[in-house]
């Protein structure tokens, strides 16, 4: 046996040596080594199945946010925003950056692939995922796995082949969405999912929200796309043109790209395309919203139409009125549209507003019948006329509706609803004054004037002109105030209206008073043959009578006639009590505080002023609060509290400047300077305390 074993061993050694010699002759060791290295290289290579990168405009912060979430260990990130805002481009950019940097992190384990899935604004099923991953990995078993085991097969594959999945244009409103959400919540370690979705808040993941581009970035994108498409008119456009495009499309990158593409086609100039866009007739928004529009029910479409009609933003109260729906119905519909990414929301004036993008607004208006918007306008107008006709002092309640009222007034006139237009103006004109919206009072006053002219109503024309002239006067625009008040007085006299003549006499007197001509103002409203206050009383126009009393009291004050001022202001206060007119009381009470102050009854002046401030704050009367601050600064000045005087005078001057109250601003600045001087020169304060001053400048204050 030993001899046989020895011979076998020798034979095997001979065979081994022969094979080794043959292998060396054929070069097998280097080939085996090369194949081994090739397998290792392939194992380290990431398969990238992503769309090409697009250079992003802005979005630096958003890219950093996504990467920061991933670096902290998040495996699922939701990129959210309205349709066309650039979610896909952001997700693709982040995925490309991961492809560039991930191989260097071998200790964490490299990804084997980065795969892009397009959900086409729908729910992506697990079968869809399996099909795409099967093709990417060359593994048909994923697609062949039974439906009930699809999730387990996918997890097993992702555990062996760590993958970055970029799921684009995902919509999570369908019933089948929960299967995908459950799957994404439990991804195997090492795999990641970046999801761009139009349905916000549906994924259990950190959210990165994309807003539309700001104007400067919109301009940059317009120029870039125009250079690519050869649209020279856009490249060389002025700032006003860029502003027009931004106003119409917002900062929606996809809408901007489509607009430039449409402008590049032969046969239409850029100017004509822009005019089409302003007219709402261009179809570029269809490319963005047509698919999702098919899935919006009739109530949702009507709700979006109201938002679009109100220039893109409406609150729940306005939606209830315009749509004739309950609060619960509006809330449910708005919630659905929000989940579809068609509405966003924000808080303003302690009210929730629902907003659609500028591009979506264009699309919705282009797909809404004119008759429907007429119904919305009529319902809103009747509601506001009724509400503010009953409570015309409710500036606080009106704040949330100012934009809607502004739009309605202009649109009602354009539609030929002249009577409704003027009624709405009439019940809100004091509210615009109270809130200090002087530009609106003037521009809407002219709209109301044209509406009254269209129906030949001279009394209404006079009222509209009185609003315009008094607003010019309070802003110190004396030439315009004189022109419109004289125009109004001619109309009132020609119409033979005692009521409107009294109103226009007050307007003439008011512009004279605000121009610093107090004595002339008194001569106009208190002449022997035309006593404006008595004329208004006889005509039954109590509001105008009170306005005249306020003007007369302020003129007496400015001229240093304290006793006459007090008598007039007390009549003013009694009339406000009888009407009753709560907001008007603040004006009379502040005037009484000033008279009391001049008589050095500082404590009583402070108590009166406290009442005036409480009323002004309750009614959000911003211009009266300026005067209350001015009077309080004077009280502190005359009592030696210089720091308080300076602080309040500075606030009064700043707010007066913002409201274009030139007289109030000049007086407040003078009080501030006097307080500063008195802080370093005590004898200045002593002189001021001994003889309180009615005014520090020649400018007039109040009178309205």
Image: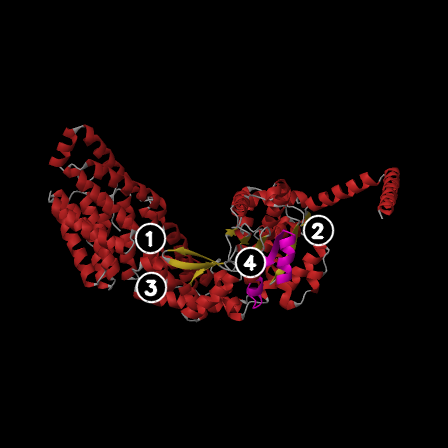
- Report if the CB atoms under discs 4 and 1 are less than 8 Å apart: no
Q: Picture coordinates of residue 148 (x, y %)? A: 63, 68
Q: Which of label 4 and label 2 is nearer to you?
A: 4
Q: Position of residue 112 (x, y in %)?
A: 66, 49
Specify whether residue 458 is painted magenta: no
Marks 4 and 1, the one that precedes in the sequence = 4
Whole-number angstrom distance, CA of label 3 to CA of label 2: 53 Å
Q: Which residue is mark 3?
A: 388
Q: Which residue is mark 1?
A: 435
Disc 2 marks which residue? 266
Packing grade of label 2 (10 A; few <14, some 14-19, many >=20) is few
Label 3 environment density (alpha carbons within 10 Å; few <14, some 14–19, many ≥20): some
- Figure disc tally: 4
In this picture, which residue range is highlighted in magenta? 152-181
The label shown at residue 186 is 4
Is 327 in front, or is 491? 327
């Amino acid at each position: 046996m030993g001899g046989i074993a020895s011979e076998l061993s020798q034979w095997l050694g001979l065979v081994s040596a022969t094979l080794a010699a043959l292998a060396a002759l054929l070069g097998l060791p280097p080939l085996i080594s090369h194949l081994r290295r090739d397998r290792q290289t392939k194992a380290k290579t990431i398969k990238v199945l992503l769309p090409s990168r697009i250079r992003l405009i802005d979005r630096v912060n958003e890219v950093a946010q996504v990467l920061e979430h991933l670096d902290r260990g998040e495996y699922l990130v939701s990129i959210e925003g309205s349709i066309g805002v650039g979610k896909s481009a952001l997700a693709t950019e982040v995925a490309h950056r991961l492809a560039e940097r991930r191989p260097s992190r071998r200790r964490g384990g490299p990804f084997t692939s980065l795969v892009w899935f397009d959900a086409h604004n729908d729910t992506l099923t697990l079968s869809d995922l399996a099909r795409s991953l099967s093709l990417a990995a060359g593994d048909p078993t994923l697609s062949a796995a039974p439906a009930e085991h699809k999730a387990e097969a996918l997890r097993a594959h992702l555990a062996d082949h760590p993958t970055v999945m970029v799921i684009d244009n995902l919509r999570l409103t369908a019933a089948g969405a929960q299967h995908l959400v459950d799957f994404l919540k439990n991804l195997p370690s090492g795999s990641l999912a970046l999801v761009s979705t139009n349905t916000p808040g549906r994924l259990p993941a950190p959210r990165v929200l994309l807003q539309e581009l700001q104007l400067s970035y919109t301009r940059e994108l317009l120029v870039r796309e125009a250079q690519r498409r050869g649209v020279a008119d856009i490249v060389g456009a002025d700032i006003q043109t860029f502003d027009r495009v931004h106003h119409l499309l917002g900062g929606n990158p996809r809408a901007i790209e489509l607009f430039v593409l449409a402008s590049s086609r032969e046969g239409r100039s850029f100017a004509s395309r822009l005019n089409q866009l302003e007219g709402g007739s261009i179809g570029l928004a269809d490319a963005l919203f047509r698919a999702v529009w098919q899935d919006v029910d009739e109530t949702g479409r009507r709700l979006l139409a109201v938002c679009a009609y109100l220039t893109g933003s409406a609150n729940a109260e306005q939606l209830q009125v315009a749509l004739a729906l309950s609060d619960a119905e509006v809330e449910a519909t708005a919630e659905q549209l929000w989940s579809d990414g068609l509405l966003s929301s924000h808080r303003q004036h302690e009210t929730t507003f629902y907003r659609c993008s500028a591009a979506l607004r264009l699309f919705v208006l282009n797909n809404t019948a004119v008759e429907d918007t007429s119904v919305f306008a009529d319902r809103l107008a009747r509601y506001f006329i009724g509400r503010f006709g009953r409570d015309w002092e409710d500036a606080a309640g009106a704040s949330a509706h100012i934009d809607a009222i502004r739009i309605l007034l202009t649109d009602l006139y354009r539609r030929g609803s002249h009577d409704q237009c003027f009624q709405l103006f009439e019940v809100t004109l004091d509210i615009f004054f109270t809130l200090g919206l002087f530009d609106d009072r003037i521009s809407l006053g002219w709209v109301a004037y044209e509406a009254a002219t269209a129906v030949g109503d001279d009394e209404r024309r006079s009222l509209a002109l009185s609003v315009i002239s008094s607003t010019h006067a309070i802003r110190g625009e004396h030439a315009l105030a004189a022109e419109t008040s004289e125009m109004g007085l001619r109309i009132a006299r020609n119409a033979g209206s005692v009521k409107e003549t009294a109103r226009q006499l007050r307007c003439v007197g008011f512009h004279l008073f605000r121009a610093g001509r107090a004595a002339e103002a008194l001569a106009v409203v208190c002449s022997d043959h035309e006593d404006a206050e008595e004329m208004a009383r006889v005509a039954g126009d109590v509001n105008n009578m009170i306005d005249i009393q306020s003007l007369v009291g302020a003129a007496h004050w400015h001229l240093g006639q304290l006793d006459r001022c007090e008598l007039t202001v007390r009549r003013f206060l009694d009339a406000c009590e009888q009407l009753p007119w709560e907001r008007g009381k603040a004006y009379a009470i502040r005037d009484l505080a000033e008279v009391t102050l001049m008589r050095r009854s500082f404590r009583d002046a402070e108590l009166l002023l406290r009442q005036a401030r409480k009323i002004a704050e309750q009614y959000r009367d911003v211009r009266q609060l300026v005067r209350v601050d001015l009077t309080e600064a004077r009280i502190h000045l005359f009592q030696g509290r210089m720091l308080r005087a300076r602080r309040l005078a500075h606030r009064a001057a700043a707010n007066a400047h913002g409201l274009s109250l030139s007289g109030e601003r000049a007086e407040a600045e003078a009080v501030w300077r006097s307080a500063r001087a008195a802080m370093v020169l005590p004898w200045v304060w002593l002189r001021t305390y001994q003889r309180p001053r009615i005014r520090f400048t020649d400018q007039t204050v109040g009178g309205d």
